[in-house]
């Protein structure tokens, strides 16, 4: 499985959460953890680039290229953090009471 799209999507979701109300604190916290982990382990990758415009496809593509070149998708710790972040960023569907 190619983990790069998952990592990029998690970073985009977290960067986008910065522009939303406080009810997305869990997403923002997960993003901050993922971003910090990548910055600590792969200092040359500019994850901050997304924050100014998370929806920009060019920025996403550049980030994906940097992540791929550095084999970040093979880093189990980063993939685990990205998976946790992606899980938090998915909207929840309320359950109906019967």
Image (spheres, rainbow, N blue to C red):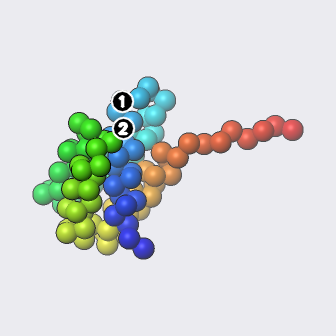
Task: Determine the image quadrant of residue 61.
Answer: bottom left
Judge whether 14 appears above or below 4 on screen.
above
Location of residue 44 in the rendering, given as x and y in whole percent from the top left corner: 12, 57
Q: Secondary structure at mark 2?
A: helix
Q: Position of residue 41 (x, y in %)?
A: 20, 60
Image position, residue 10 (x, y; %): 39, 51
User: x, y (%) of residue 77?
Assistant: 35, 64
| Image quadrant in which the N terminus is located | bottom left
Are the residues flagged by discs 1 and 2 in contact, CB closer than 8 Å? Answer: yes
Q: CA distance from mark 1 to mark 2?
A: 6 Å
Residue under label 1: 19
Q: Is residue 33 left or right of residue 40?
A: right
Name the quadrant of the C terminus. Answer: top right
Q: How many marks?
A: 2
**Along the horizontal axis of the image, is 96 left or right of 59?**
right
Q: Report the side of 67 relative to 78 (left or right).
A: left
Query: Is disc 2 surrounded by few (<14), some (14 to 19) or many (20+) residues within 10 Å?
Result: many
Vertical order, 75 against 35 (above or below): below
Residue visible at 60% across and 42% down in the picture: 92
Kindly state the secondary structure of the residue where label 1 is placed: loop
Let me know if residue 97 appears in the view.
yes
**Residue tagged 2:** 16
The residue nearer to you, when weighing 68 against 58, is: 58
Q: Residue at x 22, y 63 (%)?
A: 65
- The residue positioned 20% from the left and 61% from the top of the image is 66
């Amino acid at each position: 499985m190619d983990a790069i799209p998952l990592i990029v999507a998690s970073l985009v979701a977290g960067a986008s959460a910065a522009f939303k109300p406080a009810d997305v604190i869990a997403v923002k916290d997960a993003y901050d953890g993922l971003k910090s982990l990548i910055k600590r382990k792969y200092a040359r990758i500019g994850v901050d680039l997304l924050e100014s415009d998370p929806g920009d496809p060019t920025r996403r593509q550049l980030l994906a290229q940097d992540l791929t070149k550095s084999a970040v998708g093979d880093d189990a710790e980063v993939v685990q953090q990205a998976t946790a972040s992606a899980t938090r960023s998915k909207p929840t569907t309320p359950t109906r009471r019967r």
